[in-house]
């Protein structure tokens, strides 16, 4: 063409395995007026898309994962935000709980969302801060276990730059910074359940992925002492915990989630536009209306179930907890927004059987198909550990004399252990006894769920 007029449209191109890539298409026209008409029309249409963010608050953890969070953001994410005309305010965190404390002080009214550049620990910190700030502003007492929490109007975006990035993988399907940035830019929204963890009318924290007692609790407690090892500390602590093979005696009480239309073993994973999450949300809203008008209290009508025994692990997952090492996760059919948690009980068994169970997390086989594994979909649950009795204390003292200092630091199987710790989204909760309640779709992410691939 002799006198072409052109403009470029930046867009999203889908690639393999849930990856999104930035692409661009250039349009040419021989008429200048026609070119300007197209440009103005496209700009007007984009301006009407209220779901897209315009101003974001970004928190960067410079120490998470391999310490590349700042580099990843500046190189892969910031240029895309600039192309999309998104303005940002960036805060590089300097210490633990920096982001959480900042969210209690900053004026959040001018932002359309909060971006987390880091791993699951950084996301958890922002989650605690955002929910806490929302409840404070709404006059809700977080420490009350039965309090109706208020959802935050701000969405959270995750730019993966940590060790595992489980939340990102379970909500998008891949740990890729550019893919996550593009989901933020197009304004995707995904409502997600949050579990509130209490003890004695005191809030201990919030969880969106894993609450683990026993095996996973011991791993996170031991790995905290070995941060100097970097990411390898998880493998080392996991191997050591597996060899220790401790089991813990206690009582689990739970309220079954009868409102949800799915089950933990139906092999129907949560995907974009999930029918189960939509239906479960409607059922919960109907239950709340009945309770509001005094017609019935669903939690009183339904009966709590009680299970006692010795457990190698007690896991509660609000999502599949998938990651590159475990593509299907701890509970493949767990749903992100159905108002329930999958409670997995692994009873005392041999090391070989427990190893078989762990290996199932890495393949396509049913990991609940063992006689020593039970799984339930619950709305609430409580756990209390059995205290160490006097005769057991005498046995422990004899074990210390027999095995020396090693036993006192890391008691082997022959020595009874009083209790484990809880792994709450990668953070240690030293309280053994606790109460957990799932709050349906309490927070929203810049995500759309895992899309079904052809």
Image: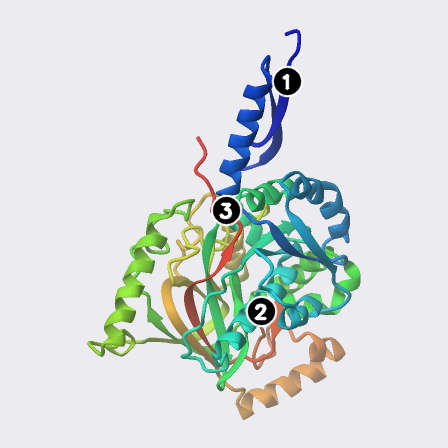
Q: CA distance from mark 3 to mark 2?
A: 22 Å
Marks 1 and 3 in Cβ contact (< 8 Å): no
Name the mark nearer the viewer: 3 or 2: 3
Please name the residue that numbered disc 1 is placed on: 5
Near-viewer residue (50 or 372): 50
SS type, badge 1: strand
Q: Is residue 231 above or below residue 36?
A: below
Residue 417: quadrant of the picture: bottom right
Whichever of labels 2 and 1 marks the residue nearer the N terminus, that label is 1
Identify the mark at residue 128; answer none if there is no mark: 2
Identify the mark at residue 188; answer none if there is no mark: 3
Near-viewer residue (405 or 278): 278
Q: CA distance from mark 2 to mark 1?
A: 51 Å
Residue under the image location 29 percent in, 55 percent down = 261
Residue 286: quadrant of the picture: bottom left
Residue under the image location 53 percent in, 75 percent down = 137
Say which quadrant the C terminus sits in: top left
SS type, badge 2: helix
Q: Is residue 201 above or below residue 42?
A: below
Q: Is residue 218 above or below residue 7?
A: below
Residue under the image location 44 percent in, 72 percent down = 149
Name the mark nearer the viewer: 1 or 3: 1
Residue under the image location 53 percent in, 60 percent down = 154
Whichever of labels 1 and 3 marks the residue nearer the N terminus, that label is 1
């Amino acid at each position: 063409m002799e006198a072409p007029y052109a403009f470029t449209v930046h867009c999203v191109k889908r690639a393999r395995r849930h990856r999104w890539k930035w692409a661009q298409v250039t349009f040419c026209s021989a008429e200048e007026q026609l070119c300007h008409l197209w440009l103005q029309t496209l700009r007007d249409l984009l301006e009407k898309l209220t779901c897209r963010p315009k101003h974001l608050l970004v928190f960067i953890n410079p120490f998470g994962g391999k310490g590349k969070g700042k580099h990843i953001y500046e190189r892969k994410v910031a240029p895309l935000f600039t192309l999309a005309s998104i303005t940002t305010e960036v805060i590089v965190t300097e210490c633990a709980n920096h982001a959480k404390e900042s969210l209690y002080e900053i004026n959040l009214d001018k932002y359309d969302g909060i971006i987390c550049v880091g791993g699951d620990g950084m996301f958890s910190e922002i989650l605690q801060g955002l929910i806490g700030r929302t409840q404070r502003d709404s006059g809700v007492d977080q420490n009350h276990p039965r309090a109706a929490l208020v959802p935050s109007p701000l969405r959270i975006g995750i730019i993966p730059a940590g060790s595992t990035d489980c939340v990102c993988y379970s909500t998008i399907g891949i740990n890729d910074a550019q893919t996550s940035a593009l989901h933020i830019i197009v304004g995707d929204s995904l409502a997600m359940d949050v579990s509130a963890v209490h003890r004695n009318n005191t809030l201990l924290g919030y969880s969106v992925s894993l609450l683990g007692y026993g095996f996973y609790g011991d791993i996170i407690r031991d790995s905290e002492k070995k941060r100097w090892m970097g990411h390898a500390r998880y493998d080392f602590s996991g191997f050591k915990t597996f060899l220790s093979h401790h089991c813990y005696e206690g009582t689990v009480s739970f309220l079954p989630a009868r409102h949800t239309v799915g089950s933990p073993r139906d092999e129907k994973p949560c995907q974009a536009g999930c029918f189960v999450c939509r239906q479960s949300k409607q059922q919960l809203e109907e239950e709340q209306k009945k309770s509001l008008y005094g017609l019935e209290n669903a939690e009183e009508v339904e009966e709590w179930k009680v299970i006692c025994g010795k457990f190698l692990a007690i896991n509660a997952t609000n999502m599949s907890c998938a990651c590159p090492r475990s593509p299907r996760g701890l509970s493949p059919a767990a749903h992100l927004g159905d108002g329930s948690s999958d409670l997995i009980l692994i009873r005392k068994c041999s090391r070989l059987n427990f190893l078989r169970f762990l290996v199932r997390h890495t393949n396509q086989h049913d990991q609940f198909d063992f006689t020593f594994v039970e799984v339930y979909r619950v709305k609430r649950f409580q756990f209390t550990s059995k205290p160490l009795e006097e005769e057991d204390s005498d046995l422990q003292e004899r074990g210390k004399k027999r095995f020396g200092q090693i036993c006192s630091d890391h008691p082997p199987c022959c020595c009874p252990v009083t209790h484990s710790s809880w792994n709450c989204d990668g953070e240690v909760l030293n309280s053994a006894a606790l109460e957990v309640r799932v709050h349906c779709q309490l927070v929203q992410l810049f995500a759309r769920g895992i899309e079904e691939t052809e």
